[in-house]
Image (cartoon, rainbow, N blue to C red):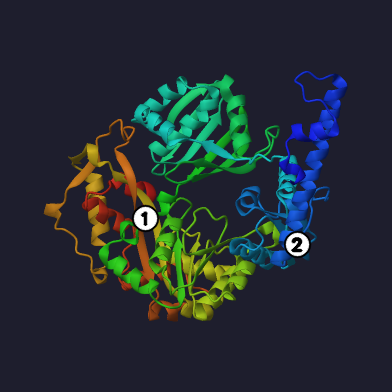
Amino acid sequence: MAPEAQSIEDLLQKTGAKSTDTKTPAEETTLEKFEEKMSEVRLKEKEVEAEKLAASLGVPYVNLKGFPISPESIVTIPEEQAKELKAVCFLNTGPEIRVASLKPTEEKVKEFVFQLGERFQANTGLYQISEESFRVAMEVYQKLPKIKAIIKGVKVTDEELAKYQAQIKNFKDVQQVLAGASISDLMTVIMAAALQLGTSDVHIEAEQERVLVRFRVDGVLQEIASLPHDFWKKIIARIKLISGLKINVTERPQDGRFTIFLKSGDTDVRVSTIPTNWGESVVMRLLKPSSISVEFGQLGFRPLVEAKLKKEIAKPHGMIVTTGPTGSGKTTTLYAILRSRNDSETKIITLEDPIEYKLQGINQSQIDHSKNYTFAGGLRSILRQDPDVVMVGEIRDLETAEVAINAALTGHLMISTLHTNDAAGAIPRFIAMGVKPFLLAPALNAIMGQRLTRRIHEDCKQEVQPSPEQLAFIKKVVSEIPATSGEQVKPEGEWKFYKGKGCDVCNNSGYKGRVGIYELLLMSEEIRAAMGESLSEYQVRQLAVQQGMVSMQQDGILKVLDGLTTVDEILRVAGEGV
């Protein structure tokens, strides 16, 4: 009979030790030493069995008891995977990786070790071990420092969001909910309210006697709530903590970022702080994926203009530029164009500063000035990636403009933005940068000017009569729409005008949601022929009108006649000077 098969009692009798229930301390010590010795014997026999098994399987054997397994080696295989495979990495020097397993001949273990070698470009070895060696190796994982993941964000659960949504039916409710919230919950309430009310930017500003909370909704700032000034230090500390900013830095601007985590999808929030008289001003921009998930047909293009633009987008090369100030919807338009071209046969690459929204199926690259990765340098690299469509966030200088034009001339569809007031101003702006007109003329396909105007709130919409001045303005704008545009305007007798009365849902503004107003300048032979160093914005506009371009202001008035918006809105975003 093998020693491990014999009972302790039998062995005690053979060695002359007593087996009664009552033992002296000396006898207890003898028994403990004996049991310890027998345990060592059994472990040695297990190691012998493992060594014999390794020999029969044709694999090398290793005993890991006492082997100096480093933390760097053990983490080569994650702990959960090690438990699943019954395998551990006991040596990783870089060029050499050694793995030990209880079942080294299993296919999934062999395949894993092969993949390990491929991933690390290393020579691998697979060894047989005993249960004791595996236990010893797994203990190394327990000695590793436990690193807690740092999550920069506000964890707004779906349950919390539903609770606050039930409490926040309109803008007036925010003040009441904030008044009853603890300091730790203030940010959760503010973010939940911002999501509920369709906010693009949250402004939190320290004033002399209060902390003001304002939401930018549909492009217009609206006061939402105010809090006691005593709350300020705790509020700003909370904002800085979750967005990765330095809490003790108050005398200079800082930029950060955090995420709102929800099951329906994460929303990134870009944070900016600047010092002010009474503390700091904080602006948090909500980068909601849904805000750029607008289909091309929902942007607000009139049918004739949409058909013309789609024709330009379908071209294999050339440049399409959209213009307008910050907040005029240029990014949304560009992304809608990219989605319309996004298929398995088209390679699309973007160069952005920064990447604000993630687009599936599109290669997005972010510039980094600290590493000298600029728009111009990045664009040169992108062109070596064999793209079909390239989007550059903004053309800011001559170098970027020249590379973009070269791309448009060499078989790529180039899409970008330019900061000018309207479409007609883009060509003189390029020339002022130093772009050669003879290169620009064949590269440009189309230029868009755009603004965003608020929609009349359908729930409180009512028919109104315009003032004599407004009616005269409408008639003047309509009369100037080029006949060559193809636009059919309703007879004056059929004109109807609407306005939102104002309600709690729209914060008594009368508006909810926005729609774009556009002008599309297509490159005609007349415009190309006129390109020169002295070409003015006025001359470009005159040539564009001759080809039938409807201006942003005219497009806006047509939307007024369609009952989508108001004359006041058109004058606000596209007044007489546009």
- Please name the residue that numbered disc 1 is placed on: 294
Type of residue at label 2? Ile
Q: Quadrant of the C terminus?
A: bottom left
At a point 35% along the width and 58% down the height, the residue shown is 295
Taking depth in this image into account, of 494 and 512 the one nearest to the observer is 512
In this rendering, is residue 324 above or below 533?
A: above
Q: Is residue 48 left or right of residue 316?
A: right
User: Quadrant location of residue 263?
Assistant: top left
Residue 298 visible at all: yes
Q: Give the x, y percent position of residue 558.
A: 25, 56
Residue with the most extreme right position: 26
Q: Give the x, y percent position of residue 346.
A: 45, 73
Taking depth in this image into account, of 308 and 110 the one nearest to the observer is 110
Q: Give the x, y percent position of residue 90.
A: 76, 54
At a point 11% along the width and 53% down the height, the residue shown is 493
- Please name the residue that numbered disc 2 is placed on: 97
The secondary element bearing badge 2 is classed as strand
